[in-house]
Image (cartoon, rainbow, N blue to C red):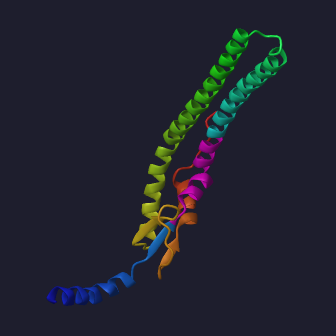
Amino acid sequence: MNKGIIVILSFFFVLPVFAKITIGTVDMRKVITTVAEGKNIKSKLEVFFEGKQKLLKAEEKKIKKLQEEYKKQSLVMSEKAKQQKQTKLQELMIKIQQQSMSYQKEMQSLEEKYKRPLLVKVNSVIEAISKKQGVDMTFEISATPVLYAKNKKDLTASVIKAYDKKHPFKKKK
């Protein structure tokens, strides 16, 4: 019984402290895609992705051509020749699936490699902006959405502006 009373009393003493807390929110996705350095990373990744897509499409065309040839020739082929062609087609299809998965892993690795330093810099800017604007806690809205807070500030625009000012990006030639 005494513990229950203590918990309730402590809640009433602590509650006023929570009422004065200001919550900050940041849309990291928007920050990363809006800052100049983030836009450059996105374009690098797109170039990489498009190059790999072209390679995969070329392989797919080869497979389709072989499939068409197989359909045309299958009526006059021996069973052994049919089996060999089918096996070759299956091997090529497996190869293209493996290449696609390899490209996806490579893309994820490259994205992580490019974004990790950006995120470190963004986090330091978020911390500075949060302190400057008197925010007690800052949340990334897609990971931890704040549905309601009496004192809430969206810091996204301030973070983008401060980041581009602190880390101006110049394209390398």
> Seen in the image, is 133 located left or right of residue 46?
left
Q: Is residue 9 above or below residue 21?
A: below
Furthest residue toward front = 79
Q: Position of residue 49 (x, y in %)?
A: 65, 36
Q: Residue at x 69, y 26 (%)?
A: 55
Q: Which residues are magenta?
A: 26-43
Q: Residue at x 61, y 23 (%)?
A: 95
Q: Nearer the viewer, residue 59 or 72?
A: 72
Tell whether position 31 is magenta: yes
> Seen in the image, is 5 located left or right of residue 71?
left
Where's the N terminus, which quadrant?
bottom left
Where's the C terminus, which quadrant?
top right
Q: Residue at x 67, y 16 (%)?
A: 88
Q: Residue at x 17, y 85 (%)?
A: 3
Q: How many marks?
A: 0
Quarter holding residue 63: top right
Tell whether position 15 is magenta: no
Q: Nearer the viewer, residue 153 or 77?
A: 77
* Majority secondary structure in the magenta region: helix
Q: Is residue 144 above or below residue 170?
A: below
Quarter holding residue 65: top right
Q: Position of residue 90 (x, y in %)?
A: 65, 22
> Seen in the image, is 40 located left or right of residue 61?
left
Q: Is residue 140 above or below residue 37?
A: below
Q: Nearer the viewer, residue 149 or 91?
A: 91
Furthest residue toward left = 2
Q: Position of residue 19 (x, y in %)?
A: 39, 84
